[in-house]
Image: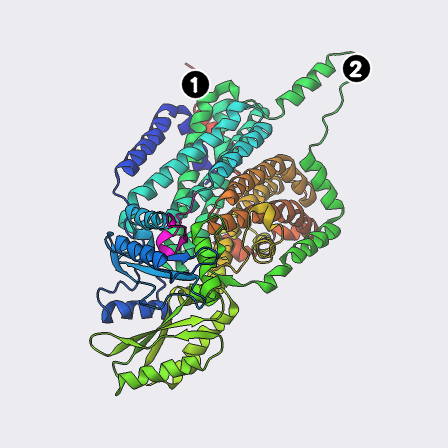
Amino acid sequence: MATFLYRLGRLAFRRRHFVALMWVALLTLAGVGAATAPAAGSTSFSIPGTEAQKAFDLLEQRFPGASADGATGRMVFKAPEGEKMTDAAHKATVAKTVRELRDGSEVVSVTDPFTTHAVSEDSTVAYLSVKYDAPAVGLKDATRDALETAGDHARVSGLTVDVGGDALQAQPDAGGVGEAIGLVIAAVVLVITLGSMIAAGLPLLTAIIGVGIGVSTISVLAKALDLGTTTSTLAAMIGLAVGIDYALFIVSRYRSELAEGRDREEAVGRATGTAGSAVVFAGLTVVIALAGLSVVNVPMLTKMGLAAAGTVVIAVLIALTMIPALLGYAGRKVRPAGEKSRKSAEKAAGSVEPAEPVKPNMGTRWASFVIRRPAAVLLLGVLGLGAVALPVSQLQLGLPDDGSQPTSTTQRRAYDLLSEGFGPGFNGPLMIVVDAKNSDDPKAAADTVTDGIKGLKDVVTVTPASFNKAGDTATITVVPGSKPSSTQTEHLVHAIRDDVASKADADVLVTGTTALNIDFSQKLSDALIPYLALVVGLAFLLLIVVFRSVLVPLKAALGFLLSVLAALGAVVAVFQWGWLGGLLGVEETGPIMSMMPIFMVGVVFGLAMDYEVFLVTRMREAYVHGESPSQAIVTGFKHSARVVVAAAVIMMAVFGGFISSGESMIKMIGFGLAVAVFFDAFVVRMAIVPAVLALLGHRAWWLPQWLDRALPNVDVEGEGLRTQAEKDADPDEDRELVRV
């Protein structure tokens, strides 16, 4: 591996024009393709195998043309103080709004509040419902605009009018100003770490090119593969973070090789062979974690994971080829590591005053401290992360709805008005589908279901059964007494499925947005352990090959579990309990997004292994070259700690930029990943890892002989580079002189 990458790095250095043009051409091609690609169509959200999804599929068959998965909009009206919605003038305004909406495109039906009894008991609040023939994410912008415009027209009469429902489902933004601030912080950290603007610009430039290619490719494939906007956001988030880090690893190693006196082409080759090997295996762990999301069997999650994994692959390829090429262009503008310190020392040596010895860097001093007190550092790190992880025991899962939107949005105000006029459960009605095709008396079966639901707790309203034309399938709408994300509503869903369904002479299915969210959360919870076993198992095997050790990968996996649990604990404390919520712009607390645990396991595991591979491979390299276990730890920190810290700060800045997003899902993901990187890099990798290695000593690198023989030798440490590099540098070296 190291020898191949060494040659690849030197080739890219020598053929820099071709390599640079190739990547620029790919970026241009992807950009043109994205600009000319057809707009993405309807992005469906399905959860195969769940009861709610089966009910949706059944409704499509038995109620053709009803658009069971079509978007819905709700326009909520509130009369001014002292007036009622039943006043003639207000009724006329509502009637005019109903007519205006019925003339819109993609509209299936519009209800009149005064004929459907959608007026509150005190007659101050009323609402109309709009049904569309396309899913929420597939609605045309003109359709959404028409809904909002109708609301604007109704406000002219003096009514308070707000619009809700999934028809106005906001498209996630990518962080905006916050993301730009994250990039600025990354640039500052790179300048401090690499010592010059030119060196700092290389990782930023290559990361942006990689993300540009990845996101543009996603845009090209969006319509064909049914990809949503969140897919691009995640790919940009992950691709930008790892792209900067991977390039930073190689540039930093290049400067170290220059400091040892090697010429620039040789330094590029060795940097690509050693740090590049770490980049390849770190990238593989990220790809395994992201692609492994496929095992959950949720199409949306699978597409998000594969798209992000593809962007990571691009980041690895760019780091291995374009960085060596750009280093060739940069020439002497990228200086050897420690050049300023050496010049200062040389200047001092030439003066009258004796030169002071070069002081050990912060990484060396920290590693020496940990080695002296490994048990105390290990205990403090584990207890600290364990304390932060405690809130996980109170974790509640769900999906965000309009109730989690900022109070400044019309969706949130409509949600609050409906709760005020009709009760909190009105925002999340349940749809009961009674499949009586095999029943002797379908009507009696539906009545049994209706009566059974009326006898349950937390039920406010049960509508009469509505049959299809064939008379074999009925739908019943149930309004719970609690809000959609509450545990009481979840218990009601289970009660209908377990108690009512068992007594009916028909198949009873519960669906609707609330039920779908509950099923989605359950499916993700059930898939978490198998997914964790698959991802950690594959990565464990991969790290055994890299480190040629059993205990080092085991320690890496256990450390990851600590950091991800602590990060989830922080997410619960902020987004569920509301701690520091005002500081982070969290206006409404509630259940944690269903996909957060499994998503964080995948992404954080991959990113955590980046630091593990880069830090510990340098220790392994020193150990293989004859240093003692303790000295190898110090050497690894001496050369790698500064870069790992810089990479972690950059990643935190990039992820932290997404906290400013107005979309609660993106905000939560950005915060969770930023906190997870902090815990993993600064507590696990910087403290727990050296403490454990110091306690294990030589045993840390133990590997059974039979396994050692069976494993392939990937030579991540670059053991074979010295001989190979000498041969490549001087092809006449082995020739003998011949007398003539």
Residues 132 and 584: in front is 132
Q: Quadrant of the C terminus?
A: top left
Residues 469 and 649: in front is 469
Question: Dot 2: what SS?
Answer: loop
Residue in the picture at 58% in, 36% down: 646
Amino acid beneath label 1: Val
Residue in the picture at 32% in, 33% down: 26
- Residue 642 position within the rendered picture, expressed as x and y whole percent measured from the top left: 62, 35
Q: Which residues are magenta?
A: 155-173
Q: Residues within 10 Å of mark 1 (few under 14, many from 20)?
A: few
Residues 158 and 707: in front is 158
- Quickly name the residue at label 1: 738
467 displayed left or right of 370 = left
- Residue 609 position within the rendered picture, expressed as x and y whole percent measured from the top left: 53, 48
Residues 112 and 104: in front is 112
Q: Residues within 10 Å of mark 2 (few under 14, many from 20)?
A: few
- Quickly name the residue at label 2: 353
Q: Quadrant of the N terminus?
A: top left
Cα–Cα gap, marks 2 and 1: 54 Å
